[in-house]
Image (cartoon, rainbow, N blue to C red):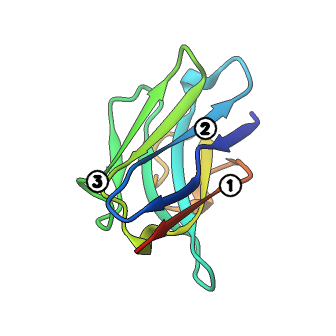
């Protein structure tokens, strides 16, 4: 599967952005999706994930209550709604996917087999 992330940009602190991750392929509904981010001079970190059915979601503590992940299997697209953005949310955001086995750790980048190219989110103070 090929992933295309979009929706990044410059926003003031407290603002909102919605990232999208469009996937190619016929079996998007079988994929578990995740979002990771990498700030300058920092390691890539887990942000959020959603299982293949959309029935289970996972969030990093730093974004819980502010970000919402969703999955539209009909549109082959995964979304990350980001509200109440903070300057520390500034990073390149990557979407990722894996299908099987489904017992993998959703919060670990090593679990994911496919990655998008990243979209830059900049939050000003």
Residue wearing tag 1? 118
Secondary structure beneath disc 2?
A: strand
Q: Nearer the viewer, residue 27 or 41?
A: 41
Task: Locate the C terminus and report the quarter of the image it occupies.
Answer: bottom left
- Graded by Cα atoms within 10 Å as few (under 14), some (14 to 19) or many (20 or more), the crowding at tag 1 reads many
How many discs mark residues in the rendered view?
Answer: 3
Q: Quadrant of residue 43?
A: bottom right
Name the N-terminal-most of marks 2 and 1. Answer: 2
Dots 2, 1 in contact, CB < 8 A: no
Query: What distance separates the C-alpha of mark 3 from that of mark 2?
Result: 19 Å
Any mark on residue 66, and which? 3
Q: Quote the CA–CA distance across marks 2 and 1.
A: 10 Å
Residue 31 is drawn in which quadrant? top right
The residue lying furthest to the bottom in this view is 41
Is label 3 in contact with label 2 (beta carbons under 8 Å)?
no
Q: Does dot 3 land on a helix, a strand or a loop?
A: loop
Could you classify mark 2 by the number of other residues whose Cα lies within 10 Å: few (under 14), some (14-19), or many (20 or more)? Answer: many
The x, y position of residue 8, in whole percent, is 59, 51
Q: Is residue 37 left or right of residue 60?
A: right
On the image, numbered disc 2 is attached to which residue?
21
In space, the residues marked 1 and 3 are separated at their CA atoms by 20 Å
Q: Is residue 105 above or below residue 123?
A: above
**Could you tell which of marks 1 and 3 lies nearer the N-terminus?**
3
Q: Is disc 1 placed on a helix, strand or loop?
A: loop
Where residue 102 appears, as percent x and y from the top left, is: 49, 39
Q: Residue furthest top?
A: 74
- Residue at 55 percent across and 22 percent down: it is 29
């Amino acid at each position: 599967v090929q992933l295309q992330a979009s929706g990044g940009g410059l926003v003031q602190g407290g603002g909102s952005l919605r990232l999208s991750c469009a996937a190619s392929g016929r079996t998007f509904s079988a994929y578990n999706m995740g979002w990771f981010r990498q700030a300058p001079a920092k390691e890539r970190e887990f942000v959020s994930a959603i299982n293949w059915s959309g029935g289970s979601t996972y969030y990093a503590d730093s974004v819980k209550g502010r970000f919402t992940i969703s999955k539209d299997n009909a549109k082959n697209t995964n979304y990350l709604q980001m509200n109440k953005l903070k300057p520390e949310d500034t990073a390149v955001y990557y979407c990722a996917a894996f299908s099987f086995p489904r017992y993998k750790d959703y919060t670990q980048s090593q679990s994911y087999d496919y990655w998008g190219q990243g979209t830059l989110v900049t939050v000003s103070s």
